[in-house]
Image (spheres, grey):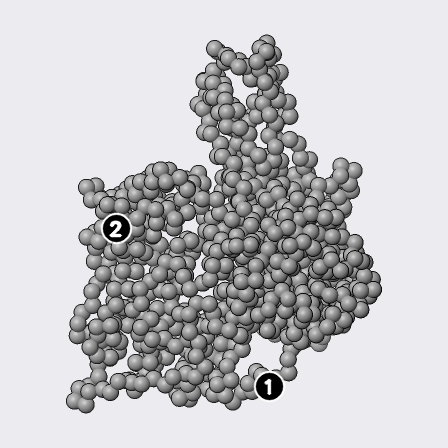
Amino acid sequence: MATLPPARRPVHRLAAAVRILTLVSVLMVAVAGIPYVLTVTIGVPWPEQVTSLNDLENRLAQPVSDPFVLKVIALAGWACWTYFMAVLARETLWLLARLPALVRDATVLRQRTQILPAHRAAAALLVGTLLLAMVGMWRLPAAHAAMSPATPSAPVVVAATAPQHVPSARTPAPTHITYTVKPGDTLWDIAERHLGDPLKWPQIYQLSCTIRQSDGGLLSDPDLILPGWRLHLTASNPPAAHTPPPPAPAPPSRTPAPTAVPHQPPPSQHASHSDEQQQADHREHGQAPQQRPAPRPRPRPVTISLGTASAIGITTAAGIAAALGFARWHAARRRTPSLDTLTAPLEDNDGQLGEALSRSNQAHLKARAARQHDPETLPRRTAPAEPGQPGTVTIAEQAGREVRIDTLAQAGGVQLTGPGAEDTARHLAIAIACAAQRLRPNPPRVQLITDQATLNRLLPHAHRPVPAWTVTDTPTAALQAAEHALLEHTCHEQHLDAGPLEDGMPALHVLLLDQSGDVSTRLAALATRATPGQLAVITLGAHADFTRHQLTVATDGTAAGTLAPLQKCSMFLLAPSAATEILHTLYAAHGRRPSPDPSDETEDPEPEATPSPAPKHASPPAATSSPAKEPRADGAPSRAVHIRLFGGFKLVVNGKECTLADTRKEATREFIALLAAHPDGLRGEEIAEKMQLVDDPAEAKGDIENLRRAARRVFRDATGKKQVAFVVLSGQVHRLDRQYISTDIAGFTGILKQIATADSPYTRAAILGQATDIYTGPLCDGADYLWAHSLRTQLHRSAVDALILLAEHTGQRSADPEPALALLNRAADLDPENERVYRRIIELQLALGRDDAAQRTLALLTERLARIDAEPEPAILALLGQVPPHTRAPSRRTAIRR
């Protein structure tokens, strides 16, 4: 929210006051005006005294008179007014209970009124609007406070040598208590938690609105704060009201301290001297020294290197990660479980990804993991910056920030030249396609229009377009598509849309052509109408002389030319090999190719299960009965300490969950979880790499020693065993002491390994049952640990496979299908897009005569597949006699996306 000029603030206050008076008047009319009118015109309809039952019967038997009708009407009017007052009180209490959420988001009131009847909606609208107007009137001075500098601009004069403390020439700037914003925070909530009163949020706003944040932004809107921003809660010393003491005579060697520049912390020697001087001030005044403020976080990079001659932005990396997730979902739709995959060893990293995909995915995961890191407790490596909003397309880096594609939407068009022009255009096409992945199933906000020849030059393996691309046969057809898109924007601006748009407004269309040919005149005319948010015209090569702006891109991405917004920036580039790797992932994200992860195998035909013959002279035991050979209880809580990572971190001591304060420290909890997920232990450098500790080996070694001490303190305080190490160091390997600590991961993987040596199907079924009982949810659920993502996926897949195999065994060897149905429902909840699970559920439901349940299962599958832009396979629809999706008419969105 921009700061209002001083001249306009009285106008806004007057408007808010008029709104409040109007609403109060309406409320007074409803509360007091209506009963006054009823009292004056009709009167209070109190019934006359009735002495007996016969008296009441006689009065009711009398003929109906006009006064009696008036009293009945008055009674009905008073009843309606009483009911409305009750409704008004009910809605007032509801709104007051949710006042913080209503202040943060006014759409809460609109959503409330949409689901209420007319009379209750009117009451809620009246009270809610009045509350918002009153809060707005009170909040206006704080929200539009002028931004004054946090510190005076006069330089600090420091003497070269000073045997005694010399007072500063200026009033020392007050130190503040700094708070780092976390996702979901609001100024109201922060003031309530840390200042004890939510109404003190203007104080936080006034103290923090001049802080230059790590991303270069400033707090200008109290309703918009971003994760990672620093806020000042309170000042440790009040502003000085007295006249400062006169400065000491300045020796010739004194030098003024340099003024701090945004994004550049002051030199360490000046900061050290300032701290010493401040501590001396406190000692002189008999005060305790204040804690040193947290160091300014280092700028986080936005450029991700993908190997030779390839670099993308973190926003594009987030789109690639979304595409990779869709690709794996599609691959898992028809994946067939097997016993071999259950006994395969776990891998920490997804080594099946190519170099470009691996680097991009790791950068995205590091940025996500950094949200939980607290630099004040444990310094970490600098993670990439947070990506832009979903649907955003970035093309370059400038001064540590990503440059959006709107920069290329210049009137007159942009011509790409130079040795890096083709790699820049290739990145542009891939970035547009990746940005659409983060919006699925909603339509993309940026669409590429190009011809087949240009696409073949940039991406030879692009045998078919992706939804964010419109690929035409000729440049003329591409030009017509761009003109049509510009016409859509014009119709939208003039409110002449043929129908409501899915995203509220047309997308930005980017016309990319390699050869203008005979359409150069027409293309030049269209380029003059290029506008940010509507159309960008980009040409490749030196032949398009009609373009007004020229952008020359070097091999390393350095940009030069006549386009001023892109001066001194580095364009993002994609080499053909990296672009092809990402393109295959985009195809797989729409179910067109297998996922890059070969463990997610897809097969068109579903193999029939081949049950093992049961013994003729032995009755088959139940699937969940104990096996003949008792499995190892590595993961059973038989030790003094049991660590549960499935479903979230939990520390169980002697059968009771431990809630020590030290276990809530993020770094200590991650260290314990990391060792619990690796029962064989990890070397120090492996721990530093997985936890993203500092690059300095000596400093990382010290951090690991501190983490080991903290973990031991947690276990010793929880058990009372002060002499036990719990975390042992064998050579260079750190591991948990198995004599005292057990983990659910060790139990899960240890039991599954026994499948390879099981001598009968019933033993295997019992092993599978025990494994599925141990798995209670995703690994370290709720924590975005960088090292946990690959392990989480593999363990989750093993649990789903175990449930499916156990359900197949139970269904083949039991006359009652209910246990198998229950197991399949559990598998469907864990793997919502696995069509083979749903197909088996529908078959069992139809066999039991539950046709309605089968229809509901199909509806649930259709809803869940819609999240990945997919539809149920024809074989499942055929079970219920429905029409396969390929015989239906294409939707409007599909036709537009082509």
In this orientation, which residue lies closer to the viewer: 406 or 426? 426
- Element assignment for label 2: strand
In this orientation, which residue lies closer to the viewer: 680 or 110? 680
Q: Position of residue 508 (x, y in %)?
A: 70, 61
Question: How many residues crowd around disc 2 within 10 Å: few (fewer than 14), some, or many (20 or more)?
Answer: many
Quadrant including the C terminus: bottom right
Q: Which mark is residue 887?
A: 1
In this orientation, which residue lies closer to the viewer: 217 or 237? 217
Q: Which mark is residue 736?
A: 2
Residue 436, by quadrant, is: bottom right
- Give the amino acid type for the residue marked by disc 2 in the picture: Leu
Left or right of 696, for residue 118:
right
> Are the two marked residues, 1 and 2, in contact with CB atoms closer than 8 angstroms?
no
Q: Position of residue 842 (x, y in %)?
A: 43, 83
Task: State whether residue 720 is above or below residue 308.
Answer: above
Question: How many residues crowd around disc 1 within 10 Å: few (fewer than 14), some, or many (20 or more)?
Answer: few
Q: Position of residue 313 (x, y in %)?
A: 57, 53
Residue 770, by quadrant, is: bottom left
Q: Earlier in the sequence, mark 1 or mark 2?
A: 2
In this orientation, which residue lies closer to the viewer: 563 or 510? 563
Q: Position of residue 660 (x, y in %)?
A: 32, 45
- Give the amino acid type for the residue marked by disc 1 in the picture: Thr
Task: State whether residue 631 is above or below residue 615.
Answer: above
